[in-house]
Image (cartoon, coloured by chain):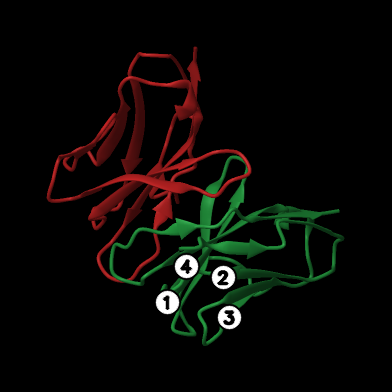
Amino acid sequence: KAGVTQTPRYLIKTRGQQVTLSCSPISGHRSVSWYQQTPGQGLQFLFEYFSETQRNKGNFPGRFSGRQFSNSRSEMNVSTLELGDSALYLCASSAGQESGELFFGEGSRLTVL
Amino acid sequence: DQQVKQNSPSLSVQEGRISILNCDYTNSMFDYFLWYKKYPAEGPTFLISISSIKDKNEDGRFTVFLNKSAKHLSLHIVPSQPGDSAVYFCAASVPGNTPLVFGKGTRLSVIA
């Protein structure tokens, strides 16, 4: 069974640009969550999608958005990039059940210059 | 406000000895706790979990202890091996389809 796949793995953008990150969950998993990891801040929850609907949302500004497609693949978008958006963005999938274990991808490393 | 706290950013242990990683939480509604391990350039991987109805869960060299009254859990690794060197994240969730809340992580270094 293939794991969670995230693309691109690395990318460099400049301030003011926008970026789209993609995540393909484990086959059969209907829930996709996104987390931001920065040095010293751990994993901070961005949002979760389940069956194409945003089910939970973290405390991030509206520049951060996401969506999920009918095949459970998900994208997240960050507009008007700021230097502080430089981080590792992690996608995780689960079957969607309560207290479910999350399966993480390797992440997309975003650097904003 | 950090609901899940890992107060030790780093820990260094000799190979063969016990590693104890600690985690405190503030939300009394948390009923499920997990530990994840993360190597550089990889995503976190699930290690072990514990439900609030238990106070201990064991899986091979890994044991998690939960003290609900103290709102504290710990991960014990015995014996520690160099391959255990990684960042360990504590996570918790409340009942229902809610997101996992993670701590900031503890970097464990096992020295041969």
Nearest the eye: B89 or A5: A5
Q: Which mark is residue A67?
A: 3
Which three-letter amino acid code belongs to the residue tagged 3?
Arg
**3 and 4 marks in contact (CB < 8 Å):** no
Q: Colour of chain B?
A: red
Q: Which mark is residue A24?
A: 2
Q: Nearer the viewer, mark 1 or mark 3?
A: 1
Q: Residue at x 40, y 64 (%)?
A: B99
Decide if residue B110 is on the left or right side of residue A8.
Answer: left
Q: Secondary structure at mark 4?
A: loop
Q: Are marks 2 and 4 on the same chain?
A: yes
Q: Colour of chain A?
A: green
Residue furthest to the bottom in view is A70
For the residues labelled 2 and 1, the Cα–Cα distance comes to 11 Å
Which three-letter amino acid code belongs to the residue tagged 2?
Ser
Tell which circle, 3 or 4, labels the residue nearer the N-terminal end. 4
Q: Nearer the viewer, mark 4 or mark 1?
A: 4
Q: Are marks 4 and 1 on the same chain?
A: yes
Q: Which mark is residue A30?
A: 1
Q: Is residue A105 above or below residue B66?
A: below
For the residues labelled 2 and 4, the Cα–Cα distance comes to 7 Å
Q: Is residue B98 above or below residue B1?
A: below
Residue A83 picture location, percent across and down: 78, 55
